[in-house]
Image: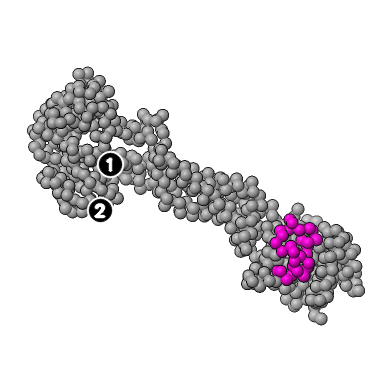
């Protein structure tokens, strides 16, 4: 019956209660929406990095990572690629040559990272082939073709089918150069990547570098991204002389961001609930002070202090928790819709693409957050009820009954 | 018949350090089981304060109150709440009932506090409300009842806990003549048939006329004690 009294008491002042319930609902919605937005942006950023640069797992000669020396190739790279292609966890594998150099047009030059790839393999590993805005992702078997970022093309003042020159150090340490024709232009989500990375055929680059069949990097995309750590662990054991790294090891800042998302969620919701707490305390305090005579009567007829305390806490919890399903429902509807259609941030596209973010953010709602968020809200309600309840417990029945 | 209530040199002084007000001043009062007693006197004579002290709603400055030999003035606040629940029924002037509960639930509430099983609670609430003539108002909330009906629910609630006596603080103050008459009849009947002890403070001559003992207070002291 105490639950019944508590619930009915909430509705004695409908307007006031509806305002509190709405505050809780809107507060939770705001918090969960913000988290879903950040989560979505982060997931997209990770996907983008995995697709364009990192893949799930990469192999390197350990010495290559530090100086990117042309000589530091992976021993028996081709055999490893062949072995990985047969692995049932692996979706796609691409062997790459990587070197840094200078790309020059008739008017200007720029520093770039040159990736020598086998287009057929690379297509399944990175998204560059899907990000083409002009031209083709290499055509037939023409020699010395290059695919560059649209942004780099603009910087160099070149167009599709124009020629550019790549200059870099060969295996022997000599400076070597090659003339390449632009076969395609791409535009990924990350403008910095577009400006700094170019793609040539593996054979063309290998011939200039003098590396033969040597590989600098083997990029692996798995069928299930969640299995990255397990698969990488096994590969590390299998190839102890090579540096086998997961995308989290290759990009620790992204791994850190992913790791702190949960803490961020608790902090954001905590701040919102802290602000809401004052509103709930105020409402409960008003409710208690308005009913002094009633509390006096209840204590007079034998309602003990723990019961009075419990009743007030229950009122606070019910009042607050009534906002939880409303907030969750509103979040589900809103985020559910935006997760399908995306949030258009094209007005800020320039700034976003510099950091590798897409113009469209698709919020990601982690349903596992509902339970902790609900518990945190209920806890806030209990905390909020303590001061009003203590106030009520201090009423003296004989005085409270006669309060006007 | 034995004494239910005994007070010895009972005093309650407000503002003892500034301007002392002796609301109850060295009152010796004994109430026997089955009495129908009215505490009368002008406003500020100490009727309500005396009822509060007898009912364990307040602590005296001096003196003692014994309920069936137990000194309640020495009890802690928590023990006193429990003692009131088990031994004393209350009817107040107003704001007697829990507004969000129905008449039946209001009566049941005290039994709930006493941990009476649900079925027994419902049965007894119905029986008591029938006794006070509210059989057809079981599911009405206080706001849907007249002042007189609300006071009758309060009497039923006071009886629900099977108390040793009922204290009523100006129970008819807000009632019209018909309701007053009706309430008094119910209380008198309960007193006569069930030997329930009633002590009420009142200004109301109609209540005084019905009482079988009238204790008059002036300035916190008993100035007369008449049994009819």
Q: Report in which chain the residue with disc 2 lies.
A: A
Q: Residue at x 71, y 58 (%)?
A: B141
Q: Position of residue A392 (x, y in %)?
A: 65, 57
Q: Residue at x 41, y 33 (%)?
A: A345
Q: Is residue B184 visible?
A: yes
Q: Are marks 2 and 1 in contact (CB under 8 Å)?
A: no
Identify the residue position indicated by label 2 in the image.
A230
**Which residue occupies the foreground of this view, A27 or A81?**
A81
**Which residue occupies the foreground of this view, B43 or B168?**
B168
Q: Report in which chain the residue with disc 1 lies.
A: A
Whether labels 2 and 1 share one chain: yes
Q: Position of residue B87 (x, y in %)?
A: 72, 72
Residue situated furthest bottom in the rendering = B1
The magenta-colored residue range is B125-153
Identify the residue position indicated by label 1 in the image.
A50
| Magenta run includes residue B128 | yes
Q: Is residue A74 left or right of residue A25?
A: left
Callout 2 environment at 10 Å: few (<14), some (14 to 19), or many (20+)?
few
SS at mark 2 in the image: helix
Q: Is residue B35 left or right of residue A5?
A: right
* Image quarter (top left, top right, bottom left or bottom right) of the C terminus of chain B: bottom right
| Magenta run includes residue B123 | no
Q: Position of residue B76 (x, y in %)?
A: 67, 68
Dividing the picture into quarters, in which one does residue A8 lie?
A: bottom right
């Amino acid at each position: 019956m105490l639950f019944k009294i508590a619930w009915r008491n909430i509705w004695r002042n409908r307007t006031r209660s509806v305002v509190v319930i709405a505050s809780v609902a809107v507060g939770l919605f705001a918090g969960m929406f913000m988290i879903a937005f950040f989560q979505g942006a982060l997931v997209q950023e990770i996907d983008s990095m995995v697709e364009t640069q990192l893949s799930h797992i990469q192999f390197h000669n350990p010495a290559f990572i530090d100086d990117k020396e042309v000589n530091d190739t992976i021993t028996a790279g081709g055999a490893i690629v062949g072995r990985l292609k047969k692995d049932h966890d692996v979706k796609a594998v691409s062997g790459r040559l990587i070197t840094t150099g200078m790309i020059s047009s008739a008017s200007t030059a720029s520093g770039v990272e040159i990736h020598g790839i086998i287009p057929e393999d690379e297509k399944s590993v990175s998204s560059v082939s899907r990000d083409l805005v002009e031209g083709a992702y290499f055509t037939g078997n023409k020699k010395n073709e290059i695919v560059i970022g649209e942004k780099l093309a603009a910087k160099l003042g070149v167009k599709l089918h124009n020629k550019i020159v790549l200059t870099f150090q060969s295996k022997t340490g000599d400076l070597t150069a090659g003339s390449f024709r632009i076969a395609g232009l791409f535009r990924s989500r990350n403008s910095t990547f577009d400006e700094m990375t170019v793609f040539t055929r593996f054979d063309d680059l290998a011939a200039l570098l003098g590396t033969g069949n040597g590989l600098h990097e083997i990029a692996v995309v798995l069928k299930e991204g969640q299995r990255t750590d397990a698969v990488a662990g096994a590969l590390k054991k299998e190839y102890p002389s090579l540096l086998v790294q997961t995308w989290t090891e290759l990009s620790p800042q992204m791994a850190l961001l992913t790791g702190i998302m949960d803490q961020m969620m608790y902090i954001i919701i905590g701040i919102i609930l802290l602000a809401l707490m004052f509103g709930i305390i105020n409402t409960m305090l008003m409710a208690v002070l308005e009913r002094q005579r009633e509390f006096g009567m209840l204590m007079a007829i034998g309602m003990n202090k723990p019961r009075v305390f419990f009743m007030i806490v229950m009122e606070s919890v019910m009042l607050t928790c009534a906002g939880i399903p409303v907030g969750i429902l509103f979040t589900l509807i809103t985020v559910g819709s935006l997760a399908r259609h995306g949030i258009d941030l094209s007005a800020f596209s320039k700034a976003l693409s510099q950091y590798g973010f897409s113009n469209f953010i698709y919020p990601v709602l982690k349903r596992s957050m509902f339970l902790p968020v609900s518990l945190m809200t209920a806890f806030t309600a209990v905390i909020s009820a303590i001061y009003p309840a203590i106030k009520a417990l201090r009423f003296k029945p004989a005085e409270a009954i006669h309060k006007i | 018949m034995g004494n239910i209530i005994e007070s010895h040199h009972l005093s309650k002084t407000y503002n003892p350090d500034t301007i002392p007000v002796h609301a109850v001043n060295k009152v010796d009062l004994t109430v026997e089981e089955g009495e129908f007693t009215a505490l009368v006197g002008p406003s500020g004579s100490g009727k309500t304060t005396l009822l509060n002290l007898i009912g364990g709603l307040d602590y005296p400055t001096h003196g003692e109150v014994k309920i069936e030999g137990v000194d309640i003035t020495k009890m802690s606040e928590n023990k006193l709440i429990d003692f009131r629940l088990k031994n004393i029924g209350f009817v107040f002037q107003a704001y007697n009932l829990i507004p969000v509960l129905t008449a039946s639930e209001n009566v049941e509430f005290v039994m709930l506090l006493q941990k009476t099983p649900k079925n027994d609670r419902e049965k007894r609430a119905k029986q008591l409300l029938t006794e006070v003539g509210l059989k057809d108002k079981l599911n009405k909330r206080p706001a849907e009842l007249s002042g007189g009906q609300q006071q009758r629910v309060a009497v039923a609630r006071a009886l629900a806990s099977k108390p040793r006596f009922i204290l009523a603080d100006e129970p008819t103050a807000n009632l019209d003549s018909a309701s007053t008459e009706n309430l008094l009849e119910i209380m008198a009947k309960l007193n006569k048939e069930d030997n329930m002890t009633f002590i009420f403070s009142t200004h109301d001559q109609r209540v005084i006329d019905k009482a079988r003992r009238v204790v008059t207070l002036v300035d916190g002291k008993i100035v007369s004690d008449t049994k009819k």
